[in-house]
């Protein structure tokens, strides 16, 4: 049996179809490449996210079930956020004992361009029941401060 691509494992879909002669074709009717199967495994999964705003914050949500906090890295800039991590597979179960194997295991990442600038230093990340919630405070461009001049 052929190893499924990342997308097939993530969605549970089937990429290859058997024709009457038994040769494998993709949905476009072309033979799949045979010599880059190792490169396919090295790819990172793209994390699925929800991004929305409140009057004061931009909120990023993603499912992080099965990921240890120490296996996750979040980089925040004023207009971009990158979430990287790795979900480790339970290696005690033999491949022969699986009936269905659809969960994604391995490295993942996602970079999101934010619709508005945020304050990276004031960001917060919380995980609750496998849901990672990142709160990014928006920069208040209307905020003004008075500066006092000091005499030396």
Image: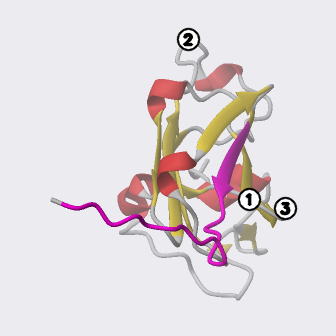
Q: CA distance from mark 3 to mark 2?
A: 44 Å
Foreground residue among 127 and 106: 127
Q: Tell me where residue 106 appears, x and y as whole percent.
A: 51, 40
User: Given this view, does label 2 or label 1 mark the residue nearer the observer?
Assistant: 1
The quarter of the displayed image where residue 87 is located: top right
Q: Position of residue 86 (x, y in %)?
A: 49, 37
Q: Is residue 150 magenta?
A: yes
Does label 3 or label 2 sit earlier along the sequence?
A: 3
- Asked whether the viewer can see residue 49, the reply is no
Identify which residue is drawn at 69% across, 19% down: 97
**Which quadrant holds the C terminus?**
bottom left
Does dot 3 land on a helix, a strand or a loop?
A: loop
Q: Quadrant of residue 43?
A: bottom left
Q: CA distance from mark 2 to mark 1?
A: 43 Å
User: Which residues are the magenta region?
Assistant: 132-151
Local packing at callout 3 (Cα closer than 10 Å; few below 14, some 14-19, many 20+) is: few
Q: Percent position (x, y) of residue 18?
A: 74, 68
Q: Are marks 3 and 1 in contact (CB under 8 Å)?
A: yes
Between residues 63 and 45, which one lies in front from this camera angle?
63
Residue 92 bears which disc, if any? 2
| Residue depicted at x 33% and y 66% | 149
Q: Which mark is residue 57?
A: 1
């Amino acid at each position: 049996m052929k190893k499924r691509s990342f997308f097939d494992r993530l969605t549970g879909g089937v990429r290859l179809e058997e024709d009457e002669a038994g040769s494998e074709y993709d949905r476009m009717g072309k033979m799949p490449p045979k010599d880059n199967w190792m490169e396919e495994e090295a790819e990172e999964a793209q994390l699925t996210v929800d991004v929305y705003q409140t009057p004061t914050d931009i909120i990023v949500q993603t499912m992080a079930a099965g990921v240890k906090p120490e296996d996750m890295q979040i980089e925040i800039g004023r207009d971009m956020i990158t979430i990287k991590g790795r979900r480790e597979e339970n290696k005690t179960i033999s491949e022969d004992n699986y009936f269905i194997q659809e969960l994604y295991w391995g490295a993942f990442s996602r970079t999101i361009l934010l619709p508005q600038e945020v304050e990276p230093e004031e960001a917060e990340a919380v995980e609750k029941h496998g849901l990672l919630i990142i709160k990014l405070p928006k920069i208040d461009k209307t905020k003004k401060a008075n500066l006092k001049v000091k005499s030396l």
